Amino acid sequence: MNAIRAFLEPYLIQIKPYLWVIKWVLRALVVAAVFIGGCQYGKSGIEKKQAKAEVAEAKETVRIVYRQGAVTEKVVTKYVDRVRTIRIKGDEIIKEVPVYVTPENDAACTVNAGFVRLWNDANQGEVSDAASGADAAPAEVSLSDIGRQKAAEAKLHRETEAQLEALQEWVREQAEVK
């Protein structure tokens, strides 16, 4: 140890006037090291908290998506069953038209071209032109044709109504999922 001191003694004499500067530089380095270490420790703590929050958010998202899927499955199953029932009943009604509108009824009731034009325009959302003499002529449409068409349109209307109700139910239930 004495040998080291003897070796460094000439240099220490030269450094002695600057010793206070060296002490302040060393103190500043220690403060900087502590500050940087604290920042790194704080940063790692924040990153851990952020990662935990992201994992919790992902778990919550998965839970919500699962519940939304369950709502969708329930509503679609209910809708499909209801539409199946509507179609079966609608087809039965269409098959019953000849029972209620017989060939004799078809023969006794002439449907004029004006009625057919009005019917078609109404189905397209159009306003018919003024009636003309050609409208009085008999059309090739029978009363039973009109009965079948009305039953088919009523079936389609009920299917659309069921679809809208299912969509409204789905929207309401999706909004309730939390």
Image (cartoon, grey):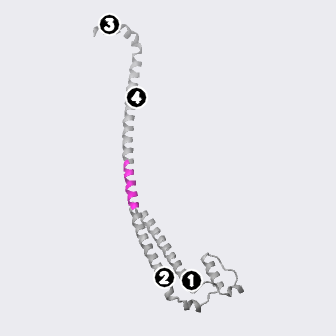
Which is nearer the N-term, disc 2 or disc 1? Answer: 2
Which is nearer the N-term, disc 1 or disc 3? Answer: 3
Q: CA distance from mark 4 to mark 1?
A: 94 Å
Q: Position of residue 5 (x, y in %)?
A: 31, 9
Quadrant for the N terminus, please: top left
Report the disc number at residue 32.
Answer: 4
Eyeballing the image, is 48 above or below 166? above
Q: Position of residue 134 (x, y in %)?
A: 70, 85
Number of numbered callouts drawn: 4
Q: Mark 4–mark 2 contact, CB under 8 Å?
A: no
Q: Position of residue 97 (x, y in %)?
A: 50, 85
Q: Mark 1–mark 3 contact, CB under 8 Å?
A: no
Q: CA distance from mark 3 to mark 4?
A: 33 Å
Q: Dot 3 surroundings within 10 Å: few (below 14), some, or many (20 or more)?
A: few
Mark 1 sits on what residue?
A: 145
Q: Of the residues shown, which amino acid type is indicated by label 2?
A: Lys
Residue sitting nearer the eye, 31 or 79: 79
State which region is magenta: 55-69
Mark 2 sits on what residue?
A: 95
Instruction: Write the residue at 29% across / 7% down.
Output: 3
Instruction: From the viewer's perspective, tell me whether residue 4 is left or right of residue 158.
Output: left
The image quarter in which residue 143 lies: bottom right
Instruction: Write the residue at 41% across / 22% down.
Output: 25
Q: CA distance from mark 3 to mark 2?
A: 121 Å
